[in-house]
Amino acid sequence: MSKLTIVANITAQPDKIELVKTELLKLIDITREEAGCINYDLHQDNENPAHFLFYENWETRELWQAHMKAPHLAAYLAATEGAVAEFTVNEMTHIG
């Protein structure tokens, strides 16, 4: 199977942008060390600073699912409870 691409969109509550950004930044280094992580890149929208996007590539879906159960992700969810207005994840496959 080809690698798995993840596009995760996170929209912070307007008054919680800095909190969410700080917590998202904490995920980068630890996640990049995880088994199967090819890249884990965080972006912030130039027009809407409340919108963040992770562009990720993983060796397999199973390794990405292990990441989703990692303690640092649970810590992020606890720290940002009520601060995120919207969160979507798309699992994608490179086709061209």
Image (cartoon, rainbow, N blue to C red):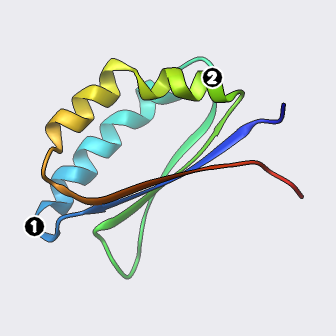
In the depicted structure, whether residue 19 falls above or below residue 39: below
Write down the quadrant of residue 38 in the picture: top right
Marks 2 and 1 sit apart, C-alpha to C-alpha, by 35 Å
Q: Amino acid at mark 2?
A: Glu
Q: Is residue 7 left or right of residue 84?
A: right
Residue at left offset 30%, top offset 71%: 49
Residue at left offset 76%, top offset 48%: 93
Q: Amino acid at mark 1?
A: Asp
In the depicted structure, whether residue 80 falls above or below residue 96: above
The percent coordinates of residue 91 (x first, y second) are 62, 47
Mark 2 or mark 1: which is in front?
2
Write down the quadrant of residue 52 in the picture: bottom left
Residue at left offset 86%, top offset 54%: 95
The percent coordinates of residue 32 (x first, y second) are 53, 29
The percent coordinates of residue 45 (x first, y second) are 41, 71
Badge number at residue 62: 2
- Quadrant containing the C terminus is bottom right
User: What residue is disc 1 on?
Assistant: 15
Residue at left offset 38%, top offset 82%: 47
SS class, disc 2: helix
The percent coordinates of residue 29 (x first, y second) are 43, 30
- Quadrant containing the N terminus is top right
Number of callouts: 2
Earlier along the polypeptide chain: callout 2 or callout 1? 1
Which of 70/39 is in front?
A: 70
Q: Is residue 3 left or right of residue 41?
A: right
Q: Classify 10 Å Cα crowding around label 2: few (below 14), some (14-19), many (20 and above).
A: few
Q: Is residue 33 visible?
A: no
User: Furthest-bottom residue in view?
Assistant: 47
In the depicted structure, whether residue 95 falls above or below residue 32: below
SS class, disc 1: helix
User: Furthest-right residue in view?
Assistant: 96
